[in-house]
Image (cartoon, coloured by chain):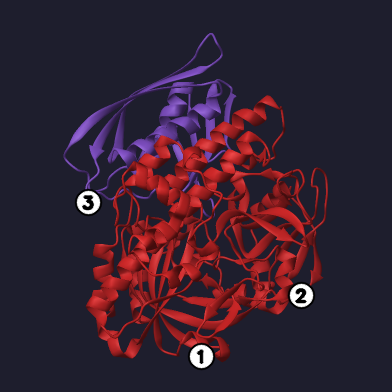
Chain colours: A purple, B red
């Protein structure tokens, strides 16, 4: 576990780290999933593959979180584990993310920790220092 | 090190002087207790808002202000309209999150023993928590009508009466709404959530009128001491969240092209008179109409259940419905402005609502934590100083994590039960996060605004049942 929650009065602050961009994104995703994951885990499980592209690495993070919020609500599925996650910078300068998530069907007795309304740009940062990446972001809950 | 001087302007009102990139000074309303607990991040967010272009007079923070994203929660700012800016960061993800208060016409004493089973019944019958769950499921064409006409459409469908609309902010419908400016994704999220409470700090509360301060109002409105009240706190659900997500992304791309520096990127904005500004404004209003319709459906369902289950003598009537996450086009001193209120309620003493045979300034609900009930306030002339705004609640004192570390679900529920408050909850963490000790004192918030002359209290209620989403 390479993430921590930091105190925020109204919302949830997350700091996630990794040796590479992919592992930093993986830590970020794990932190988000730990909030959304069904505590009364349902039996049914499936996979969800996503491919996202953005011109900025920070925006890619926000788009990824926004995508799983949307999917979990509309398709009534809750992401539970990350099977695969890769982020790379393309020659065009854009960032490409490929992710495979394990999901469970949200049922009446599903109990995620909390509902995430949105991933905010407030205090959002992705930094690289001494070969290590760190992301800080705030979720509106 | 962050250091800011707060200059005392008058009792319970402090000013942050204009410095650096700030275009106007900041102002915060606080009594001594609130001032002692003020979060430095709130001051910093007041300054960020003060740096937005065209901001009029002051960047304001209500006494319940706490650290949010973009604007502080409890933040108010006005800009010229249509030649000024509009920012989703001054509204929040939950567009037109608001509170609705209803009277029942029956006394707590009559039904005291039925409060617990009633709370359980409401918990079972009102969709709450995460994801899908609705009282009413429109098709796509009908959803567009709801986005355009809000609670007015819902009442026409038989879920409520005309009086509900008369006592609702904007009569339950903001006309400048365009369903076409709302993405398919947002609509998809809204289709299965119309008439649902949601999660987080959203709640349904059963209260008792404990103290009356304005008998003239209560006599006309038919309110009496010991009367059972109902309160709903909810908003535009996933539809509103998605509208905000979509438009932040669109506006972020636009602002980057213009190479504009933002002290906080959540404060992304556009000029209200541009194509993007007009479309965002009408999408935001469509989200607001969804929220009006959402609260109307829940209140009608509760009204029906209440009469069927508790007492056929009950007459559940709306007292008011107040929005607290919204940007509204208003006119002050003959000038058109757009007032952003993020966690603040519109409160114009000139705006009237009829109760009995008389008209009164439209009242404002200020709910406290789940242990402290609410105040119903009447706005006063001095509200012009806050662009006609009042607080929206008690305001958080502790962070969610802090609250979870400090308070445990069972202890809180037991403590509240000992005070005669029965709590039914969806998430155990939610109870810890929303523990009474995690909030500022409601009485401090009310004392601050009444002493300054922004409002006076009509009555105070105490909770007896609470449902947490």
Rounded to the nearest angstrom, the CA distance separating label 2 from label 1 is: 33 Å
**Residue B168 % position (x, y):** 50, 67
> At 68% across and 40% down in the image, what residue appears?
B273
Horizontal and vertical percent position of residue B16 = 78, 57
Q: Residue at x 41, y 51 (%)?
A: B146
**Numbered disc 3: secondary structure:** loop
Q: Looking at the figure, which quarter contains the C terminus of chain B?
A: bottom left
Give the Cα separation between the discs numbered 1 and 3: 44 Å
Query: Toward the viewer: B142 or B400?
Result: B142
Q: Are marks 1 and 3 on the same chain?
A: no
Q: CA distance from mark 2 to mark 3?
A: 51 Å
Looking at this view, name the residue that lies furthest to the top: A91
The circle on residue B219 is 1
Tell me, for residue A108, which label it has, or none: 3
| Label 1 packing within 10 angstroms: few (<14), some (14-19), many (20+) | few
Chain for numbered disc 2:
B
Q: Secondary structure at mark 1?
A: helix
């Amino acid at each position: 576990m390479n993430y921590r929650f930091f105190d925020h009065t109204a919302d949830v602050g997350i700091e996630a780290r990794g040796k590479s961009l992919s592992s930093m994104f993986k830590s970020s995703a794990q932190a988000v999933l730990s909030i959304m994951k069904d505590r009364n885990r349902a039996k049914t499980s499936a996979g969800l593959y996503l491919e996202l592209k953005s011109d900025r690495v920070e925006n890619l993070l926000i788009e990824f979180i926004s995508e799983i919020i949307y999917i979990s609500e509309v398709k009534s599925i809750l992401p539970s584990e990350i099977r695969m996650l890769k982020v790379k910078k393309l020659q065009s300068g854009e960032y490409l993310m490929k992710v495979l998530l394990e999901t469970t069907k949200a049922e009446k007795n599903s109990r995620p920790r909390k509902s995430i309304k949105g991933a905010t740009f407030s205090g959002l940062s992705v930094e690289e220092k001494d070969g290590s990446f760190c992301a800080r972001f705030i979720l509106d809950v | 090190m962050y250091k800011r001087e707060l200059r005392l302007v008058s009792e319970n009102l402090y000013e942050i002087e204009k410095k650096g990139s700030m275009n106007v000074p900041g102002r915060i309303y606080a009594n001594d207790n609130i001032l002692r607990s003020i979060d430095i991040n709130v001051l910093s967010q007041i300054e960020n808002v003060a740096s937005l272009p065209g901001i009029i007079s002051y960047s304001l923070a209500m006494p319940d202000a706490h650290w949010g994203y973009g604007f502080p929660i409890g933040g108010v700012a006005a800009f010229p309209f249509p030649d000024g800016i509009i920012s989703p960061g001054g509204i929040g993800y939950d567009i037109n999150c608001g509170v609705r208060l209803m009277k029942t016409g029956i006394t707590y004493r009559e039904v005291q023993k039925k409060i617990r089973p009633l709370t359980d019944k409401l918990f079972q019958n009102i969709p709450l928590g995460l994801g899908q769950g609705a009282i009413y499921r429109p098709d796509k064409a009908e959803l567009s009508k709801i986005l355009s006409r809000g609670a007015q459409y819902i009442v026409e469908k038989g879920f409520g009466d005309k009086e509900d609309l008369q006592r609702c902010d904007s009569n339950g419908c903001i006309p400048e709404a365009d369903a076409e400016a709302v993405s398919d994704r947002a609509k998809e999220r809204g289709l299965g959530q119309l008439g649902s409470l949601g999660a987080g700090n959203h709640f349904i509360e059963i209260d008792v009128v404990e103290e009356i301060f304005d008998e003239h109002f209560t006599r006309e409105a038919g309110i009496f001491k010991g009367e059972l009240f109902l309160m709903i706190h909810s908003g535009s659900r996933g539809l509103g969240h998605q509208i905000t997500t979509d438009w932040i992304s669109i506006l972020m791309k636009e602002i980057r092209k213009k190479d504009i520096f933002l002290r906080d990127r959540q404060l992304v904005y556009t000029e209200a008179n541009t194509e993007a500004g007009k479309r965002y404004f009408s999408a935001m209003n469509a989200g607001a109409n969804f929220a009006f319709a959402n609260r109307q459906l829940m209140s009608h369902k509760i009204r029906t259940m209440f009469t069927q289950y508790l007492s056929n003598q009950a007459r559940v009537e709306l007292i008011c419905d107040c929005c607290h996450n919204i940007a509204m086009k208003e006119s002050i001193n003959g000038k058109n402005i757009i007032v952003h209120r993020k966690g603040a309620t519109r409160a114009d003493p000139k705006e009237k609502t009829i109760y009995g045979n008389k008209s009164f300034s439209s009242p404002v609900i200020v709910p406290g934590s789940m242990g402290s009930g609410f105040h119903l306030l009447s706005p006063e002339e001095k509200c012009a100083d806050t662009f006609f705004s009042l607080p929206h609640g008690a305001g958080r004192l502790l962070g969610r994590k802090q609250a979870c570390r400090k308070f445990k679900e069972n202890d809180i529920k037991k403590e509240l039960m000992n005070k005669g408050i029965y709590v039914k909850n969806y998430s155990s963490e939610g109870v810890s996060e929303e523990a009474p000790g995690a909030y500022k004192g409601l009485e401090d918030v009310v004392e601050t605004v009444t002493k300054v002359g922004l409002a006076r209290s009509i009555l105070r209620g105490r909770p007896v049942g609470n449902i947490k989403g």
